[in-house]
Amino acid sequence: MVSVRELGAAVALTALLLGAGVAWGHAFLERADPRVGSTVKAAPSQVRVWFTEALEPAFSTLEVVNQSGDRVDRGPARVDAASPVLLQVSLKPLAPGTYRVKWRVLSVDTHVTEGDFTFRVSEGR
Amino acid sequence: MASPYLAAALAAALALCAWPALASAHGLAGKRFFPSTLTIEDPFVADELSLPTFLHLKQPGEGDVPSSQFTNISGEFSKRIFPNLGLTLEGEWNLLDPADNRRTESGFGNLEVSLKYQFFTSAVHEAILSVAFGWEAGGTGRRKAGAESFDVFKPAILFGKGMGDLPEALRWLRPFAVTGVVEGVLPTRSGNKTFVINDNGDLEVEIEKNPNVLHWGFAVMYSLPYLQSFVKDIGLPAVINRLIPLVEIDINNPLDRGFAGKTTGTVNPGIIWAGKYFQLGLEAVVPINERTGKNVGIRGQIHFFLDDLFPTTIGRPLFKW
């Protein structure tokens, strides 16, 4: 039978392990605008990506390329001052086609994560 | 006066110089996050804690043999010595009801120590290869609770491969990944002699053979976080978008000492929920044959990512190379 003392110790250990005060995580992609893998009718003027952790601005990059591999963003990307989980970059006018968003970010605890996704601008307006 | 950005950049640069290895922690290969599997060993080296892993199996009675149940609670602590070299300590507690002596027995199993070296990582192909060597220290657990009195050595090769490099036409398959292990289980004693008094009062010697075993297994998983982040955001709600359904296959092929061909194993379908700092896993344990068992068991695990929980202390390698 588990005693109250043992139960208390287990709860305390769990609280310690989960304590937000000492913990940061890897920055994984939370959501994006345009959405990952989506097709949009109107060409977006910027790409915004929200991560699960705050980012180090100096070591976080975001690029957008077309199907030929040419950059179509007006970089460099910037981390939003009010929301350090948001990385965004402005875009040049986009023609219909498929575009790839590539990111590599450093979270505040020095974990690096990277990734990419595509979105498509459709012909119809 | 320096701007906050400059200060942050300097701090980050200093941190990178001090702990460059943190970038590859946590079961990551490129875009791929490999969760810690419940049944088979992980291919990656990381700072992590599995506590507890819970396993419960029941066996129906047959003839004179009564029904029985087996409960195992284990913990595993993995620590990176160098960025790609880690040490794992594992302990367990067993409850056998009844044990071989027809009584209910409980106690600790043998302690196990293993060293793992992740010698290959490909970000582009989401691939990991590693080798490991485990040592189960005989006699450190309670004999009546199933702990052997001899050492067992376990050399192993492990792999992980994500399918993120599949062509665009197959993009819906990119969230798939597979991890696996091929391991030798090599007891240092070929057999155990047990002296018993039979019903006639005579002394009998029973010899229990300890075969060498080829242990292998693999896990096939489909990562919904990968689907959402890299393939297509299909609008999954908050809890669902962190689920990773998987099936683990775990097989033991005894090779000699009268046990050759007597394969045992389990198929373990289940699901993992991966959060920021820990993951939760639950699996059914389905025997592949009657030799393994007849009933479906259950396995559960809480697993902590120490590199995320304690990035500046116990969650980083002891040495940077």
Image (tube, coloured by chain):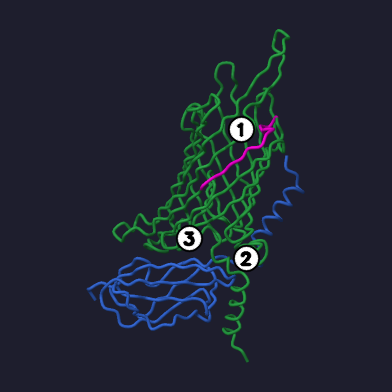
Chain colours: A blue, B green
Describe the element under mark 1 as helix, strand or loop: strand
| Whether residue A59 is situated above or below residue B112 in the rendered picture | below
Which one is earlier in the sequence, the residue at label 1 or at label 3?
Answer: 3
The foreground one among B81 and B94 is B81
Quickly name the residue at label 3. B29
Q: Amino acid at mark 2?
A: Lys
Residue B109, position as x, y percentages in the image: 67, 37
Q: Amino acid at mark 1?
A: Phe
Residue B136, position as x, y percentages in the image: 65, 40
Tell me, yes or no, whether the two marked residues, 1 and 2, touch with CB atoms within 8 Å: no
- Same subunit: marks 1 and 2: yes
Q: Quadrant of the C terminus of chain A?
A: bottom left
Q: CA distance from mark 1 to mark 3?
A: 37 Å
Q: Which mark is residue B320?
A: 2
Q: Which stretch did the figure color magenta? A: B144-157
Q: Of the residues tagged 1 and 3, which is closer to the observer?
A: 3
Which one is earlier in the sequence, the residue at label 1 or at label 2?
Answer: 1
Chain identity of mark 3: B
Quickly name the residue at label 1. B70
Q: Residue at x 66, y 32 (%)?
A: B146
Chain identity of mark 1: B
Residue A70, position as x, y percentages in the image: 32, 78
Give yes or no for residue B156 being in the magenta stretch. yes
